[in-house]
Amino acid sequence: MNEKDKSRTGLLDPRTKLFVVLFCGTFTFLADEKGLLLLFVMMLVYLSVQGMYKKALKFFPVFVLLFMLQHMITAYLTGAVAVLGFVVFIIVRFMPVFMAVSVLSAVAPGELIAALQKLRLPKAVIIPLAVGLRFMPSISREFLAIRDAMCLRGISPFSINALRHPVMTMECIFVPLLMRSMKISDELAASASARGIDNPGSRTCLRQLYFGIFDGLALAVLLTAGIITGLFFIK
């Protein structure tokens, strides 16, 4: 594979990007608050190295605001609002995982499936993972559409009323989101079947997949970060 092909597919092999997701998923709940901040900074650098500067700029203010909101709810609010605080806590903890998954979801489906087959994973794992990664960008667009519809009706999820009525706010978000998720999942399943995802044969890829220098450096950084987190930032 020449350098032009490598620039189109990114610096890292899809398998390395999958290892980054697994790393974040492992340490995001094991690490303490300082470890979480370190992990978030690592993911900002990771997105920037992959050329996803706009995504990094979007994730940064969202993480900072939710991190501050979590501490405000914990310190000053009680009762039903504590439920909203728990939701914010989960979102903050999963933010590094979302950032890693956003890089993996940008990989072409055929390239991702070919990379997973090289790991000798069964199709029972490959197919749900490939379809799930294509599902996330679609559901994020649906969430933005639901948010806009709520704002038109004066039920903004980022207003004071959301803090006063957290249960109603979550209901207004999750009920239409679940309904749209069912339809999107059916559409993605039909699209995957049309592309031959259930073909029993081995899937081929136009681009050659291999571990390069950048993959080795990325895995070395992950190993070092894992050791540092395990020694100093585990709860």
Image (cartoon, rainbow, N blue to C red):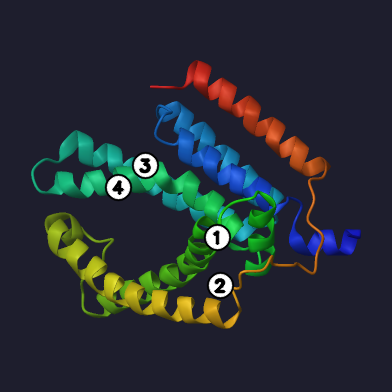
Q: In the displayed orientation, state which residue is furthest to the right.
A: 2
Q: In the displayed orientation, state which residue is furthest to the top.
A: 231
Q: Nearer the viewer's eye, disc 2 or disc 4?
A: 2
The answer to whether residue 60 is left or right of residue 74 is right
Quarter-of-image position of residue 104: bottom right
How packed is label 1: few (under 14 Cα within 10 Å), some, or many (20 or more)?
some
User: Looking at the image, do the residues carrying marks 4 and 3 touch, with CB atoms under 8 Å apart?
Assistant: no
Q: How far apart are the two marked residues, 4 and 3, measured between alpha carbons?
A: 8 Å
Figure label count:
4
- Residue highlighted by disc 3: 67
The answer to whether residue 175 is left or right of residue 60 is left
Expressed as whole percent of the image width and height from the top left, the position of residue 51 reads 70, 56
Assign a secondary structure to mark 2.
loop
- Residue highlighted by disc 4: 88
Three-letter amino acid code at disc 3? Phe
Expressed as whole percent of the image width and height from the top left, the position of residue 224 reads 64, 25
67, 116: nearer the viewer? 116
- Residue highlighted by disc 2: 198
User: Looking at the image, do the residues carrying marks 3 and 1 touch, with CB atoms under 8 Å apart?
Assistant: no
Q: Nearer the viewer's eye, disc 3 or disc 1?
A: 1
Q: How far apart are the two marked residues, 2 and 3, measured between alpha carbons?
A: 42 Å
Assign a secondary structure to mark 4.
helix
Q: How far apart are the two marked residues, 2 and 4, measured between alpha carbons?
A: 38 Å
Three-letter amino acid code at disc 1? Lys
Residue at screen point 30% across, 71% down: 177
Q: Earlier in the sequence, mark 2 or mark 4?
A: 4
Three-letter amino acid code at disc 4? Val
Quarter-of-image position of residue 107: bottom right
Residue at screen point 21% across, 50% down: 84
Expressed as whole percent of the image width and height from the top left, the position of residue 38 reads 53, 32
